[in-house]
Amino acid sequence: MALPSEAQVLEALSRIQDPDLHRDIVSLGMIKDLRIGPDGVVAFTFELTTPACPVRDQFQTQARELVGALPGVKDVQLRMTSNVRPAFMQRGDGEGNGRLIPGVKQTIAVASGKGGVGKSTIAVNLAAGLAQTGAKVGLLDADIYGPSLPRMLGTAAQPKVVEDRLIPIEAHGLKLMSIGLLAGADKAMVWRGPLVGKAVEQFLADVTWGELDYLVVDLPPGTGDASLTLAQRISLSGVVIVATPQDVALDIAVKALQMFRTVNVTPLGLVENMSWYICPDCGHESHPFTHGSGEKTAERLGVPFLGAVPLEEAIREDADRGAPIVVTRPDSPGAKALRQIAEKVAAQSSIRSFRQLPVINVR
Ligand SMILES: Nc1ncnc2c1ncn2[C@@H]1O[C@H](COP(=O)(O)OP(=O)(O)OP(=O)(O)O)[C@@H](O)[C@H]1O
Ligand SMILES: [Mg+2]
C-alpha cells in the first residue's frame, strides 16, 4: 500500500486544536522530526509548550488515532516532549524580549492586595506542582519583610557564594533563594523605604539561577512600595493574584490587579484561596462563602480564573512542617486543586508567549 506523504500526516495532525491557544498544533510548531519509514512506521516528536500541559494525554491519543487511521500507516511512534517558550516582554524603550534574569524563561509573581491570604502557600505549591511535571523551577522569596519560604520548604541552608554570586539552595526539587537564608528571618525586617529597591536589586542581580523554565516570585503583601519596586525591577512575565472570598467581595484583589496593570505586568489570573472548608476529622466539605464569587470577579475584570483552593488544615500543617502539600499528600483535595492551578498558570504563560509569535507555516 502507498505510504502517506508528509503533507498528509501534517494535515491529519492539524485537526488537533490547542484548547488554550485556539490554534492547530501543527501551525503552532508542535510537531517536529517527522519521519515516514518505508515500512509504514510514522515517527515524530510532539513538543508541548509546557511539561505541565493538562491535555498532554488527550493530545497523545488524538495524534496516535489520527495518524494511525491514514492509509498505509502500520505504526505510530510518538515522542512527547516539552519546551517552555520564553516570555516576550515589551520594555518601555520598545525593545522586546527584555529578560532581566539570564536563562530564566518565565518569571511568574504571586501577589495579593493584602497580607495573610496564602500567597506564600500558593507560591510554594505552584512551584512544586510545576516541578513535579518535570519543569525546571526556581522560587524567589521576594518578601523581604517577612520571608517565609525557607520555613515552608523546611530549610535553613546557607547559599554558597561562587565568584561573588549566590547559588540558590535546593529543596523539594526546587531552587530557592530568600533573604531569609542570608540575613536570618528576624533581621530581614530592617529594610525600609529606598533601601528596599537597592537591596532587592542587588539581591536579584547577584543570584545565579542557571537554566529555569519557571521562576516563581513570592512578593511582599499588598500594593505598597516594595511590591511596586519589585514589579518594576524584575522583568515579570506575569502575575498571579491571590485573594480570599472576602477580598473578592471587598475588591481588594482589584486594587492589586490595577497596580500591576499600571506597571505593565500581565495578569495571568486570579486564585481564590480558602474558598471552602474541609473538616479535618471527617473530610466533610462546607461552603460558608458564596460559591463562585472569585470566578465572577475574574470574569468582570477580564482575567482568567485559575482555580479555588479549600481551607484545609493539612495545607497549613505541611507548610509548618516544611513541605508543600502537593508533595506530601498529592491526593488531598488541596493538593489536587493546587496542581490544577499550576497547570492553568503554565497554560496562561504559554498563551502570553505565543500571542506574540507568528504562525509557523510548515507546509
Ligand atoms: N488553603 C489553606 N488552607 C489552610 N491554611 C492555609 C491555606 N492557605 C494558607 N494557609 C495558612 O494561612 C497562613 C497564611 O498563609 P501564607 O503565609 O501563605 O499567606 P501570605 O499571603 O503569604 O502571608 P503574608 O502576607 O504574611 O506573606 C499560613 O499559616 C498558611 O499555612
Ligand atoms: Mg507570605
Image: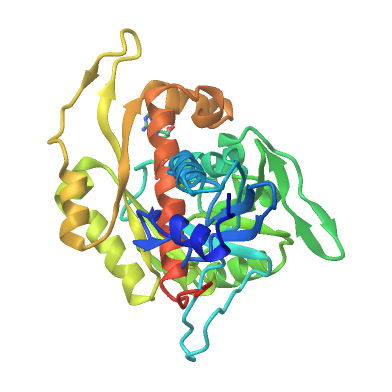
* Count of numbered circles in the view: 0
Residue 213, position as x, y percentages in the image = 61, 56
- In the foreground, 101 or 191: 101
- Which residue is painted at 60% across and 36% down in the image? 153
Q: Relative to residue 88, is residue 44 drawn left or right?
A: right
Q: Quadrant of residue 331?
A: top left
Residue 211, position as x, y percentages in the image = 70, 59
Residue 149, position as x, y percentages in the image = 56, 42
Residue 45, position as x, y percentages in the image = 62, 53
- Which residue is painted at 45% across and 37% down in the image? 339
Residue 191 visible in rendering: no
Q: Relative to residue 278, is residue 148 drawn left or right?
A: right
Q: Residue furthest top?
A: 282
Above or below, 256 relative to 235: above
- In the foreground, 288 or 225: 288
Above or below, 175 relative to 9: above
Residue 121 visible in rendering: yes
- Which residue is painted at 61% across and 71% down in the image? 201
Q: Residue furthest front?
A: 1
- Which residue is painted at 31% across and 42% down in the image? 307
